[in-house]
Image (tube, rainbow, N blue to C red):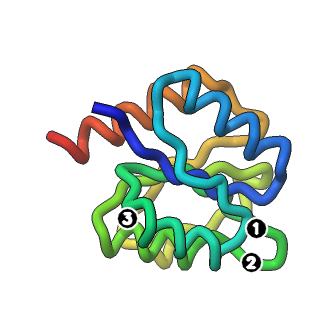
Amino acid sequence: MTIKILIVEDDPFIAMDLQDTFEDAGFHVAGPAASVKVGLELIEKEDPDIAMLDYNLGRETSIPIAKKLDSKDVPYAFLSGQVDRVVTSDLSQERHVFSKPFTAAKIISYMRKLAELKTA
């Protein structure tokens, strides 16, 4: 089974790196999306299994995307260059936050576990 992952990242270089990382690991990538609007559209269009969300998207955060994913029971993790500023208190449960720069192997391993939990 191919895992479909939504990537939301506003830095084009990090987005390309994440896309390559996940595709090389056998995931199907939805996105990447650089804004809340595009991320929400991709959730409806692509119906992802899991998601990787950059917390800060320029002048907005990915919290609206996270809430939409919560409503659809889609597991996700955050990615942030400012981990100490990531606020997840308005989400239904705490989420894992990866720090930038990230280690591809750790992210892939964690996201595979999220996918396994969803399909279990």
- Can you name the residue that lies furthest to the front here? 45
Residue 14 as seen in the image, left or right of residue 46:
right
- Residue 16 falls in image quadrant: top right
Q: Are marks 2 and 1 in contact (CB under 8 Å)?
A: yes
Q: At which x and y percent is residue 40?
A: 53, 74
- Quarter of the image holding residue 36? bottom right
Q: What element carries label 3?
A: loop
Q: Is residue 73 above or below residue 120?
A: below
Who is closer to the viewer here, 73 or 6? 6
Whether residue 40 sits left or right of residue 61 in the image: it is left
Left or right: residue 15 compared with residue 119? right
**On screen, residue 58 above or below 6:** below
Image quadrant containing the N terminus: top left
Residue type pointed to by label 3: Gln
Q: Earlier in the sequence, mark 1 or mark 3?
A: 1
The x and y percentages for residue 46 are: 43, 60
Residue at image coords 67%, 38%: 18
State the CA–CA distance, disc 1 to disc 3.
21 Å
Give the x, y percent position of residue 97: 58, 48
Numbered label attached to residue 60: 2
| Residue 116, percent from left and from top | 26, 36
Q: What residue type is labelled 1?
A: Leu
According to the image, label 3 marks what residue?
Answer: 93
Q: Which residue is denoted by mark 1 in the rendering?
A: 57
70 lies above or below 108:
below
